[in-house]
């Protein structure tokens, strides 16, 4: 906890500086308000968005803010604080001592899950957590799942053995699945017991287990998933998930069951969902699986079939994937983005470029334009972070695409974790919209490029909300501004005062 003297000093600095800060610089006052807003809990969850935006800046000067969040009573604030400090840590790890200070098991579990997802927990730390006497059993089960997913042996399965007798269905199910993955075939009985229980209670648990199995490649759960596919009156969403799991883990008869359902359904929506499910698993099945799609009345499904057959045969599928993107179907757009994310960057590059070029084509098609533009943000972010010598490609695309797409590209650079994404627009002196100009200015300012008087005036406008940027970007502009004007320490003193 922060010592009382430090709190008193921070409050005193706030009292001494806030009046002069407000009178001298209204923009700095707006910055204080925006940063303060990020540290307050909002019913709509806005604090999560604002704090993620601040964490994305990876700025060591924000360490006092994250340290203060750790002392808050609200668990979400504590989690953001510990994650923020972990992201600033040279080793890129969370501080296990801060985890130990958390008394609430649910908060511990959420923090550990977030740390695993953000690569802020390494294997030695995970093994250490498994030996902690004070760590709750649900958290240890989460850590065990992480270790098993990395093919790391568990020194003891005592935690899983105990969880098997838990009244908590999620814990019991996770323990059973992990023990199965470790070679204990008898643990499957616990999954069968869960499935025999109340439908309302078991549904979210079974969905969670199958999603975890897919994400972590826990293939031993495949036969259980296949049995679930045979149930009558199974929930529609769970039915697709069980089928996906069985096909992914190549359970005998799973692909044939998919074909039976695809050929039997008369619903266009169901055929599209089943087609997308199978193309996502194309590398797990034979190319002949996609033959029934050839003569489908829907061009979208025909194109999905072409994509699936190419992937199943191990052939380059760029042309087919881009053709699918042009069908302008929401599920297809989402799948193309996910598919590109799985590829090596050089293999993904033609598809990422296609995502950018397709964002506003045809120009009069407004359906799913928001999703297509979000794809542009993702594509630009990926290329900036992973591709080599990408500057000529980014420059050529920036010159070619319409204004909205250009804005989305610059947004991708703003979000990028690349070391110097601002260099990808180095030399560009004009943009196709005011929003693009503002985003480019924010990008350059964030990364410390010199600002002239006109630039600083525009940055002030961004902070005060006059340029139409949403709060997650304004809060980044606010922090950038107070740093550029040497007001960061005073600002933090005002933000952290109580």
Image (cartoon, helix red, strand yellow):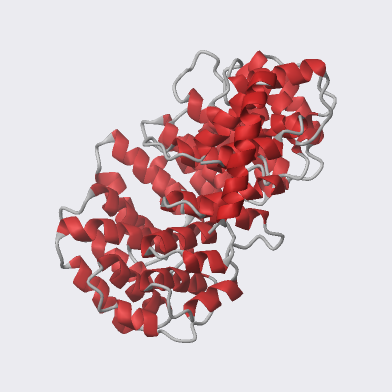
Residue at left offset 66%, top offset 26%: 21
Closest to the observer, 131 or 372: 131
Instruction: Determine whether 100 is above or below 461 in the image.
Output: below
Closest to the observer, 294 or 253: 253
Closest to the observer, 127 or 11: 11
Closest to the observer, 255 or 360: 360
**Residue 434 x, y percent position in the rendering:** 66, 14
Instruction: Determine whether 305 is above or below 484 in the image.
Output: below
Total numbered labels: 0
**Residue 224 x, y percent position in the rendering:** 29, 69
**Residue 123 x, y percent position in the rendering:** 59, 72
Instruction: Determine whether 390 is above or below 147 in the image.
Output: above
- Residue 376 can be seen in this image: no
- Residue 444 can be seen in this image: yes
**Residue 436 x, y percent position in the rendering:** 67, 20
Q: Would you say 203 lies left or right of 8 here?
A: left
Residue at left offset 20%, top offset 66%: 195
């Amino acid at each position: 906890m922060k010592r009382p003297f430090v709190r008193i000093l921070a409050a005193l600095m706030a009292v001494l500086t806030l009046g002069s800060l407000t009178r001298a610089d209204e923009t700095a006052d707006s910055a204080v308000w925006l940063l303060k807003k990020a540290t307050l809990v909002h019913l709509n969850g806005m604090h999560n968005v604002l704090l993620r935006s601040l964490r994305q800046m990876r700025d060591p000067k924000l360490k006092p803010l994250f340290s203060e969040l750790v002392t808050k009573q609200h668990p979400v604030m504590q989690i953001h604080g510990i994650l923020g400090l972990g992201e600033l840590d040279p080793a890129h790890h969370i501080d296990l001592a801060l985890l130990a200070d958390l008394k609430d098991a649910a908060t511990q579990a959420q923090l550990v899950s977030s740390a695993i997802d953000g690569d802020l927990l390494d294997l030695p730390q995970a093994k250490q957590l498994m030996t902690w006497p004070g760590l709750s059993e649900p958290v240890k089960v989460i850590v065990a799942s992480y270790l098993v997913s990395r093919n790391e042996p568990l020194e003891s399965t005592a935690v899983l053995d105990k969880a098997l007798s838990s009244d908590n269905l999620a814990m019991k199910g996770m323990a059973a699945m992990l023990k199965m993955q470790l070679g204990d075939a008898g643990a499957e009985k616990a999954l069968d017991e869960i499935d025999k229980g109340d439908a309302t209670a078991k549904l979210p648990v079974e969905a969670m287990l199958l999603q975890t199995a897919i994400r972590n490649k826990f293939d031993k759960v495949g036969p259980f998933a296949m049995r679930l596919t045979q149930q009558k009156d199974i929930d529609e969403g769970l039915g697709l998930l069980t089928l996906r799991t069985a096909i992914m883990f190549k359970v005998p008869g799973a692909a044939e069951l998919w074909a039976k359902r695809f050929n039997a359904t008369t619903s266009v929506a169901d055929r599209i969902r089943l087609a997308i499910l199978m193309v996502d698993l194309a590398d797990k099945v034979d190319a002949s699986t996609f033959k029934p799609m050839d003569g489908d009345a829907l061009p979208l499904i025909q194109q999905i079939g072409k994509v699936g057959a190419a992937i199943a045969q191990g052939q380059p599928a760029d042309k087919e994937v881009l053709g699918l993107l042009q069908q302008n179907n929401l599920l297809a757009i989402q799948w193309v983005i996910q598919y590109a994310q799985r590829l090596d960057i050089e293999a993904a590059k033609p598809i990422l470029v296609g995502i950018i070029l397709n964002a506003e084509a045809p120009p009069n098609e407004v359906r799913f334009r928001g999703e297509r533009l979000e794809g542009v943000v993702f594509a630009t972010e990926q290329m900036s972070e992973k591709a080599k010598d990408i500057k000529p490609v980014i420059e050529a695309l920036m010159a070619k695409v319409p204004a909205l797409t250009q804005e989305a590209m610059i947004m991708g650079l703003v979000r990028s974790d690349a070391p110097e994404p601002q260099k990808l627009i180095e030399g560009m002196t004009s943009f196709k919209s005011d929003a693009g100009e503002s985003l480019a200015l924010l990008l350059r300012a964030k990364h410390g490029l010199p600002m002239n008087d006109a630039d600083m005036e525009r940055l002030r406008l961004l902070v005060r909300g006059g340029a139409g940027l949403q709060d997650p970007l304004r809060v980044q502009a606010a922090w950038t501004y107070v740093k550029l004007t040497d007001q960061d320490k005073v600002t933090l003193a005002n933000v952290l005062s109580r």
